[in-house]
Image (cartoon, rainbow, N blue to C red):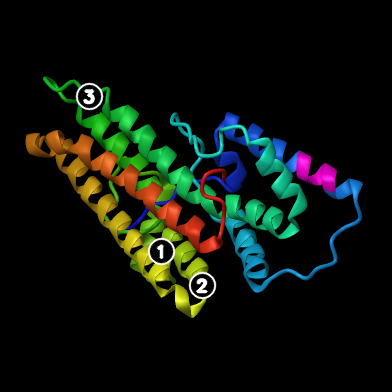
Amino acid sequence: MIAALGSGTCPYTCLSASSRVSVTRIAVKVRASVSASPGNSSSASRRTAVLSGLALVGLVLPLPKPGLAQTPEVSAQPSKKFVETVLQDPELRKRLDNGLMLLAPIRGSRARLKEADFKLSKVNVYDPNPRIFREALGTIRMASMNCYEFEPTDSDTFETKVSALQAQLKLGDACTFRLIAKNVTNLLPAEERDLRQETNDSLTELLNAFQLLDDMVDRASEGDAHAMERIGDCIQFAIAHTATFEHNIQKCLGLPLSVI
């Protein structure tokens, strides 16, 4: 079964309205501070320079459009101490901005999974409607970011079918999660091999969770009662693994885990 990727272009728009407000507030305060004082002349570190390049890639990655689910990670108000720290640290400002762009595909994927979970909550267990399972499956495949193989169905979007064809023709690695992990782990020094392995392991577990979920929902759409019973646990399992993967990416980038 091959991965599907939703339409859309800008990572910023994939955040919820409350998330965009919080990110904008931080950006406004940062820019106001920069305008008030002459710029810092210190050169960027290798990690910051490469991260900037990755963020530019993040700007053009196809991302899922906002769904019913919200992404709470950046919706909390930043503390005064954190804002002051950001204002005083140009490198942290750049890493924070670029890090948010790289994390957007992961958070967008989790939002899609929550949207699929919402759709599946409408299933009548006594008279299940196959159409609901097929619609949820299409949403799950958009959330999978081109990272596993499947046979496209009539309910899949045009973008999903194109992504499937691209993977079948092996036109490069289309898996967004894998591209993010590969690039950020390349930034790590040799002594951080444990973090590199932990990140790659969390990627593998995430992809396995997606494949299991896809299989359960696909079987449920065909009337498999056992699969229907397992869907709830499988979708929560996949959501949890997106959070674990995101956490490891943040650690690789040296981002403040409790705030971003």
Q: Which residue is mark 3?
A: 123
Mark 3 residue element = loop
Looking at marks 2 and 1 on the same chain, the residue that comes earlier in the sequence is marked by: 1
Q: Is residue 188 left or right of residue 234?
A: right
Locate residue 25, reporting x and y percent.
Answer: 71, 35
Indicate whether 234 appears above or below 96.
Answer: above
Q: Residue at x 56, y 60 (%)?
A: 254
Residue at the (68%, 56%) spot, across then down: 92
Q: Nearer the viewer, residue 165 or 38?
A: 38
Dominant secondary structure of the magenta stretch? Answer: helix
**Which span of residues is magenta-colored?**
29-33
Q: Quick one: which residue is furthest to the front in this view?
A: 81
The circle on residue 213 is none
Judged from the image, the secondary structure of the residue bearing numbered disc 1 is: helix
Q: Earlier in the sequence, mark 3 or mark 1?
A: 3
Residue at image position (21%, 50%) is 212
The mark nearer the N terminus, 2 or 3, is: 3
User: In the displayed structure, does residue 107 sit left or right of residue 115?
Assistant: right
Is 114 or 147 nearer to us in this picture? 114
Q: Disc 3 to disc 1, how far (Cα)?
A: 33 Å
